[in-house]
Image: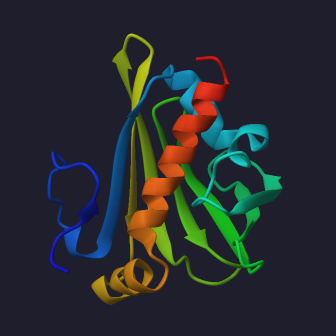
């Protein structure tokens, strides 16, 4: 693959385009609520992950250097441990993190989520994951169906936000 995987046809190319995956979606919800959906375990466990996955949060400390440790259980019962270390928390505009599986191992990728207030109670979320190499990105896209998984995750977020009465 030569270009960033994106669901946003207007997304600009970046210098890391050959090793990144990017998703963007507009939600009919205020930015504060959308940001909370990312940083509050009561929210995030309701929507994080592709359809059929269950996310269990073991700890969540949302501050630079803080950790979100969670397990995603797939529809086949397989557990996928996740270990996130927040590198930036700028409420309610931006989150950045190193995303790995266990403490002490190098992160599998670096991710950012930006929250753009579009007015009228609408928010655009752009999630960008940058992998160490294009091969690492391609592996996740092919072996774990990351493009479809990202799309389903944002669909679940939209459903969750709608259920919050926004």
The structure residue drawn at horizontal position 41% and vertical position 27%, both measured from the top left corner, is 123
Q: Position of residue 145 (x, y in %)?
A: 44, 75
The structure residue drawn at horizontal position 64% and vertical position 17%, both measured from the top left corner, is 165
Left or right: 51, with 96 as reference point: right
Q: Name the foreground residue: 102 vs 43.
A: 43
Q: Name the foreground residue: 6 vs 155.
A: 155
Left or right: 53, with 90 as reference point: right
Identify the coloring. rainbow
The structure residue drawn at horizontal position 63% and vertical position 61%, both measured from the top left corner, is 85
Q: Based on the displayed image, in which of its 4 quarters is residue 160 positioned? A: top right
Q: Based on the displayed image, in which of its 4 quarters is residue 135 positioned? A: bottom left
From this view, report whether residue 134 is shown above or below residue 119: below
Q: Quick one: quadrant of the N terminus?
A: bottom left
Q: Based on the displayed image, in which of its 4 quarters is residue 39 positioned? A: top right
Q: Name the foreground residue: 35 vs 7.
A: 7
Q: Quick one: quadrant of the C terminus?
A: top right
Q: Position of residue 118 (x, y in %)?
A: 33, 20
Tell me how many marks there are. Answer: 0
From this view, report whether residue 21 is shown above or below residue 166: below
Q: Position of residue 5 (x, y in %)?
A: 27, 65
Residue that lies at the very extreme toward the right in this rendered image? 58
The structure residue drawn at horizontal position 74% and vertical position 60%, both measured from the top left corner, is 54
């Amino acid at each position: 693959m030569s270009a960033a995987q994106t669901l946003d046809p207007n997304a600009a190319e970046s210098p890391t385009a050959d090793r990144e995956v990017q998703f963007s979606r507009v939600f009919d919800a205020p930015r504060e609520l959308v940001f909370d959906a990312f940083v509050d375990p009561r929210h995030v466990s309701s929507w994080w992950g592709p359809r059929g996955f269950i996310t269990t949060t073991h700890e969540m400390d949302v501050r630079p250097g803080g950790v979100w440790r969670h397990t995603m259980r797939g529809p086949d019962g397989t557990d996928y441990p996740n270990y996130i270390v927040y590198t930036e928390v700028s409420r309610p505009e931006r989150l950045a993190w190193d995303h790995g599986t266990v403490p002490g191992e190098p992160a599998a990728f670096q991710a950012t989520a930006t929250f753009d207030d579009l007015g009228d109670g609408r928010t655009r979320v752009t999630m960008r994951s940058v992998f160490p190499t294009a091969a690492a990105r391609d592996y996740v896209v092919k072996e774990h169906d990351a493009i479809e998984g990202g799309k389903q995750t944002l669909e679940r977020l939209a459903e969750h936000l709608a259920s919050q009465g926004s």
